[in-house]
Amino acid sequence: MNRTGAVFIALSLGSLPLLADDLPAPIVDVHLHALAADQQGPPPLAFCLPLREWPAHDPAGPYVDTFMGLQKDPDQSVRDCENPVWSPETDEELTDRTLEIVERRNIIGVASGSLTDVYRERLPQQIIPGIMFSVGNNPPPIEELRAMIESGDVQVIGEVTNQYDGITPDDPRFEPYLQLAEELDVPVGIHVGPGPPGVAYLFGPNYRARLHSALTLEEILIKHPRLRLYVMHAGWPLGDDMVALLWAHPQVY
């Protein structure tokens, strides 16, 4: 069994529903967003998949116009867009469409975001509650997070989005959360890799591409050897750094 399979089992033990005869084998999704329909801008938004190119941007104008132009009018922004995928327009529609797939595919999802409680209330046996935050933007107080973990309202610390604020994993502000996770044996999922193209010119002015490197995680792993850590986005596109980290630190997923 590879490490990916092992962490899936570790996260899902005790949470798997009984398999009905007509259900497929369970899929464990350790990175399921439970975000609002307008999280990426006013809905509906579109993508033409597979996305083969990104529209050219003229820096004489604001990048947000280029970015939103693709999502609002994919036929004009990208060649050969015959069948764009359009997003739901309301939180209710987004929830319904997401959870229909979760049920049909027999998915066990580690969910984080503003709709996590809604997802969990609808499918309590298939949603593992996480918590999404950055220590640079109103993080939960440590004792409050401890209480949520001890009550079962939070079972995974993640998605941790420090990278969007230009904050490295070994930043002193994040240290108390790592101590808590190690103490309570709670998995931590950290965003290390790409955000939306051009994110520093959209909503993350402190976002830096150098923080894509999975090697930024080394110091916290050495300091917290019992930490259950998984790398969201796998440090893409710096794959060699990710491989080097996995080789040097066998507790990483």
Image (spheres, rainbow, N blue to C red):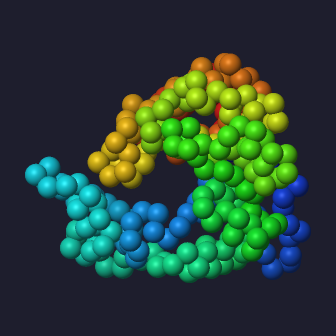
Front residue (pair 47, 159): 159
- Name the side, left or right, on which 162 lies relative to 199: right
- Name the side, left or right, on which 91 lies relative to 13: left
Residue with the most extreme left position: 60
Q: How many marks?
A: 0
Q: Quadrant of the N terminus?
A: top right
- Name the side, left or right, on which 197 lies relative to 212: left
Q: x, y (%) of residue 247?
A: 62, 25
Q: Is residue 148 visible?
A: yes
Q: Is residue 238 visible?
A: no
Q: x, y (%) of residue 181?
A: 74, 35
Quarter holding residue 187: top right
Q: x, y (%) of residue 169?
A: 55, 30
Q: Quadrant of the C terminus?
A: top right
- Name the side, left or right, on which 168 lies relative to 19: left
With respect to residue 41, does 212 lie above or below? Answer: above
Residue, x 85% and y 51% (percent of image)?
Answer: 151
Front residue (pair 190, 138): 138
Residue, x 86% and y 77% (percent of image)?
Answer: 21
Q: x, y (%) of residue 237?
A: 42, 40
Front residue (pair 43, 141): 141
Residue, x 23% and y 60% (percent of image)?
Answer: 66
Quarter holding residue 191: top right
Residue, x 66% and y 58% (percent of image)?
Answer: 111
With respect to residue 250, does 191 lie above or below? Answer: below
